[in-house]
Structure formats: C-alpha cells, structure tokens
Amino acid sequence: NAGVTQTPKFQVLKTGQSMTLQCAQDMNHEYMSWYRQDPGMGLRLIHYSVGAGITDQGEVPNGYNVSRSTTEDFPLRLLSAAPSQTSVYFCASSDRVTGQGRYNEQFFGPGTRLTVL
Amino acid sequence: QQQVKQSPQSLIVQKGGISIINCAYENTAFDYFPWYQQFPGKGPALLIAIRPDVSEKKEGRFTISFNKSAKQFSLHIMDSQPGDSATYFCAASKNSGGSNYKLTFGKGTLLTVNP
C-alpha cells in the first residue's frame, strides 16, 4: 500500500492564481481530511469528507473548495490564491469507527508546501 | 478559541533524560486523545493515544498520563534518544456515531535530544 499520497510536493503561485492539490489513498478509508500547518499554529482542519459525495467545512474553510467523487481521491482547490494561504497542506484519511470504544487512526500524507507570492 | 493548549513550545533534553510535554483541553466532550510525532519534511504519524476511561497508557518508552478532572494529559518519553528529536503534537476529538476523525491539534512542541 502506498498509503496517502499528495501531489505536488512543492508549489509556488502568484496571488490570484488557482490550483488543485491532489490527495489519494489506497486503504479504502471512508474519511478524508485536509489540514494546513503554519509555524506555531499546529494543524488546523480545512475541510473533511465522510464518504464519496459528502463533504463539510472544518475550522478554516474560507478560500478552499473540495469535492469527493470517489473513495480514493479528495482534491483541495484554491480558486484565487492569497499570500495568507502560504502553508504546508496535509491530507489525512481514516477508517470508519465500528463498535463502542474504538478509535480510528488518521494517516497523514507527506504534505504539499505552497507559497503564494 | 484554542481548544487544546500545549506546552512547552520547545524542549531540549539530554540523551537518557525524560521529556515531558503537557496539554490541556477545554471541551469536555472530547474522548480521544492522540499524540502525533512529526519529523522534518514528513507528515505527522500517530505515536500513542488514550481514552478518558484510563489514567495512563504505556507503549515502550512512551507514556500518556491523563487527568480527566483537570482536563489535562501529558506525554512522557523515558530514556530520550537523539532519534526522538521531532515535533510532537497533542490532539483531541470526540466520538460521535463513529465520527472521531476531526482532530483538534495543539500548537506543537519541538523536542531536541542532545547526544
């Protein structure tokens, strides 16, 4: 298993440009999430999905769009990049919890380092 | 509103020493408390996790201590090694019908273990 893969690893954009960060997982996990990591801020949840066709907003959703057409893929779209979106982006996936008291592990991808000039 | 507060921001420990990182949470609905380890240029990876029905969990040199009444939990790394040098994040989530996939993270602690 490749686990969670993200492309590209690095990207530089100009303000106003658009792009899509790709995320894929081969573990057949139902849940997928996008986080951004900024120095001294930890990781903050942007959007998440509980299954194909179902997405919802996290803590910092503004400026980002997501869709989930398949179980495997969960792309993150920046429609009009801003310098405030300079960050490292992590995609994560986890399995559905079944049974009381079970807790699922989130598996993180290697990240995409995005710079917006 | 910062729901999970982590301290210290950075920590320097000698090889063989004990590293202690503390976290405090506000939301009493949280019922899953994992610690993630992150090496430079890599994504976070689950290190150890605890549920609030136990006060301590140990896995090798890593121990989580949990104080439900104080809403605090901590990570202890015994016999710290240079290979433990990384950033450590505490996190919390709540299990609601199987939905404990939304993690709230602390801001992280950069641990440096000197040889």
Image: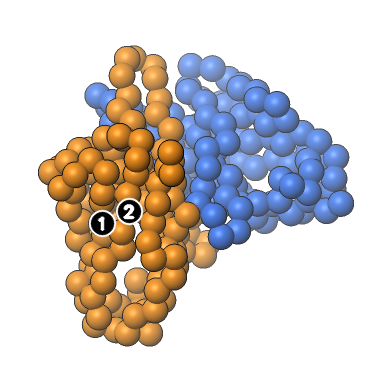
Chain colours: A orange, B blue
Q: Chain of mark 1?
A: A
User: Which residue position is annotated with label 1?
Assistant: A75
Tell whether B106 sits left or right of B85.
left
Measure the alpha-carbon separation of dots 1 and 2.
6 Å
Secondary structure under badge 1? Answer: loop
Tell whether B53 sits left or right of B95.
right
Residue at the image position 65 percent from the left and 23 percent from the top: B58
Which quadrant is home to the N terminus of chain A?
Answer: top left
- At which x and y percent is residue A116? 37, 79
Residue at the image position 27 percent from the left and 76 percent from the top: A81
Q: Amino acid at mark 1?
A: Pro
User: Which residue position is annotated with label 2?
Assistant: A23
Residue at the image position 57 percent from the left and 36 percent from the top: B47
**Image mark for residue A109:** none
Disc 1, disc 2: CB below 8 Å?
yes
Q: Quadrant of residue A2?
A: top left
Residue at the image position 39 percent from the left and 20 percent from the top: A102
Tell whether B1 sits left or right of B66.
left
